[in-house]
Image (cartoon, rainbow, N blue to C red):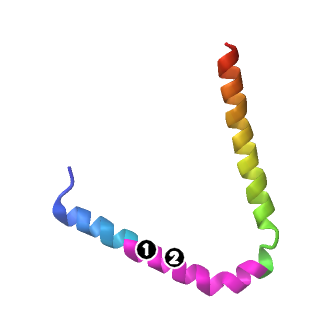
Amino acid sequence: MFSQGQLYFAGFFIVIFTIAMIYVYRKDLPLHKKYYKGSYWILLAFLTFIAMLFVVKILTKNIS
């Protein structure tokens, strides 16, 4: 399906991209703490909403 070179490139890209993203996030961490206070509550609310949608889907599937 993929050549050996393509697989090496994909693996190399994933490793380098992950390292770069960690480096950039660590560099911007003080700004994140300053400007995005309380953003975990928004994430928690979003994940709770998605979980509630799955619960409703499962409950309505069992009814019919």
Q: Secondary structure at mark 1?
A: helix
- Marks counted in the figure total 2
Residue type beneath disc 2? Met
Residue 48 sits above or below residue 19 on the image: above
Q: Residue at x 61, y 86 (%)?
A: 27
Q: Residue furthest top?
A: 64
* Residue 11 position in % (x across, y down): 31, 67
Start-end of magenta stretch: 15-33
Numbered badge on residue 17? 1
Q: Residue furthest left?
A: 4
Looking at the rendered structure, the kind of residue marked 1 is Phe
Pick the front one: 52 or 1: 52
Q: Is residue 47 magenta?
A: no
Residue carrying label 2: 21
Secondary element at tag 2: helix
Q: Dots 2 and 1: beta carbons under 8 Å?
A: yes
Residue 41: image quadrant is: bottom right
Q: Is residue 59 left or right of residue 19?
A: right
